[in-house]
Image (tube, helix red, strand yellow):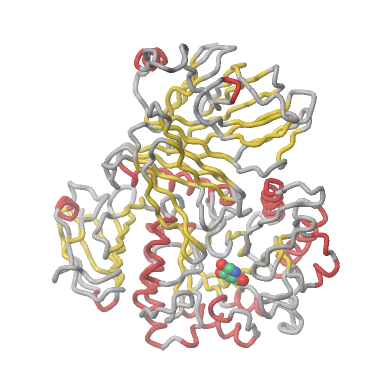
Amino acid sequence: MNATANLEGSGTQLLVHGGVGDRPRLLHAGPTLPGATAQDFAGLSERQHAPGGPQLPVAPSLLNPLGTGYPGPPGLLLHRDGCSWAVDLRLVEYIEPSASLTVVTRDDNAGVTVRHDFAIDASTGVLSLSASLANSGDTALDLQWLSAVCLPLDPRFDRIMAFGGKWAGEFQIEEWQPVRGAFLRENRSGRTSHTSFPGLYCGTSATSETHGPAAAFHLGWSGNHRLRIDRLPDDTLALQAGELLLPGEMRLEPGESYSTPTLYACWAEDGHGEATRRLHAFVADQVGRSVPRPVHFNTWEAVYFDHSPDRLFALADQAAETGAERFVLDDGWFGARRSDRAGLGDWFVSEDVYPDGLGPLADHVRSLGMEFGLWFEPEMVNPDSDLFREHPDWVLGVERVDPIASRHQLPLDLTRSEVSDYLFERIDHLVRELSIAYIKWDMNRDIQHPGNAGGRPAVHRQTRAVYALIDRLCAAHPELEIESCSSGGARADYGILQRTHRIWTSDNNDARQRHAIMRGAAYFLPLRVLGNHVGPKRCHITGRRFDMHFRAGTAVFGHMGMELDLATESVSDRGILKAAIALHKRHRALIHGGDYHRLETPAQLAAIGVVSRDRGEALFQTAVIDQHPSPHPPRLRFVGLDLQRRYKVACVWPTFLVGEPASFAGSALMQYGLQLPQTYPDTCLIHHLEAEE
Ligand code: DGJ
């Protein structure tokens, strides 16, 4: 067996070095270094003895466990009743099928075997990394932390972009400068979370959208997480990412094992934009599903809990007439759910509200040429519900600790098979009975006290049980599409996206704020999966008013939908909305399949574009968020075009600025730019570009 294992694909390279019995070392993970060998790294990194330091410094290994004496933070923490904490993992073997690499390591004294799985996606270069730990000893073992790996980073990286926020303010970008010590993001919310998205971008102070070294990392997991980047005293930089385990949560009996969630990593030499495009292409390949993505009508902000068949029939008529292709009946159709205080868990159509059931509405929706979708929040229960009255013990909680009130609901314990079976039976039955094509799967609270029957914390098992329930439904209904929603965008990650097809990005339909939310989310998630809806004239979250041109133009870039009471919109505004939906449909193959670019603009603008793979066509969205500081707006420099070709450029939105196309050189459009028109703030301009023959 070679003492070096090399994995390469699409510009990404991973090089592990170490013979049997050695501690394997990750020499390089990043852009391909053509011809570089393990000997090169050994020679180039040779150091003299540092005064005051150990005579033989400990080199980093794949997890740096405590038994090695490595001075940095360990990527593995465990013990057996307070002992056996000093693990020292040595190489057993490399298993090297073509596009992946498995590194098996073991410490016989500690009774621990760890298997590292690495795979490079051949078309995008995105690297998937995970680790599995098996208890090969003969007593129980308490696992406290297992990072997918300890990943050495380019020490030049001096900027970290983190993503977080709050309900209705997701995916806000925060910039950090890693100084010596740790940059740490921890999430204990029991879901992916609003506040700490499990993803980071790294770059240097000189990295831009189009230039410079960049890297992106994402943990594909919908439960608790920990991400850290440490700069050690010797200036080396390393990333760890894994599941944040609560005390006692992961106790492995002899023979049992635990696998980390997958860490996704990608590198780019041409700026943050290239890293984003690699991730988008990777996710698009994984998610698949109906293309073109159907335009949604969602009932939430139109009716909230005030359901009535007459009103919903009329809404369906108006939705279809405006261009909707899928009608999603949101919260409020079941049990005693006339507000958020009651009924959750009782997944039976309300006979009070729908005396004839939901069949007539579903049929009516289909007769209008739309798919019928239905909202569920399977993981939760209102204490004021038949389900809770019958099964008060079906919830997660901690004895003698009062549950934290949150939207009048408690989390069900899905690790109990009778709970998951009940949910499966109910949803499966309704999907069959109503021929449901689409489920909006919601989850509306953090889980602060995730104890289950044995008293142990159960976020890990609960997250796996949610995945298993969705997988079971998808297996029973292979055509079913599912939207992952969690009070907006609190469950948006590649773990949930392996089994769902759309993300509800945010409850905030404020067209001005939506640009920042969509831009943040799109660092990791392609526009085809990001729900983007036209909301009411007066935004229900911020109270601000926006005209229809701005609301509708904003929603064109994403998986478009609407979520408003069409009956209260003027005839003229309904006409504008219809025109925006038609525009979206005309260009959605490009919006959902083209290369995504962020433009670097002054702060009063937010601009993005999608460019076809052959650079023959492009669509750019420019939102004027605030007044320009100078009398004239700036020129917009397009990106991603072909410098050698000429393009016909036309403003296609708003309708009152639509003009005839004019011809310009691609080079001039990119390097000189197009003068933007004088407009009010809160205007959304869309330009269409087509290469000339
Ligand atoms: C939170 C979601 O984000 C909303 O879109 C809506 O579905 C409500 N829940 C319903 O309770």
Q: Which residue is drawn at 36% across and 18% down?
A: 36
Is residue 176 placed above or below 609 in the rendered structure? above
> In the rendered image, which quarter contains the N terminus?
top right
Is residue 116 placed above or below 514 in the rendered structure? above
Res. 273 visible in picture: yes
Nearest the eye: 471 or 516: 516
Single out the residue that lies furthest toward the front.
52
Single out the residue that lies furthest toward the right.
390
Residue 175, position in %: x, y? Answer: 37, 49
Q: Is residue 113 left or right of residue 319?
A: right
Q: In this view, does 563 lie to the left or right of 461?
A: left
Instruction: Locate ligand 1 by image quadrant.
Output: bottom right
Q: In this view, does 374 lie to the left or right of 216?
A: right
Res. 438 visible in picture: no
Q: Is residue 422 left or right of residue 562?
A: right
Total residue callouts: 0
Residue 503, position in %: x, y? Answer: 53, 59
Is residue 100 placed above or below 648 in the rendered structure? above
Nearest the eye: 530 or 515: 515
Residue 347, position in %: x, y? Answer: 75, 69
Nearest the eye: 52 or 190: 52
Q: Which residue is drawn at 62% across and 16% down?
A: 92
Name the image quarter holding residue 106: top right
Nearest the eye: 198 or 178: 178
Residue 457, position in %: x, y? Answer: 72, 48
Is residue 427 placed above or below 148 in the rendered structure? below
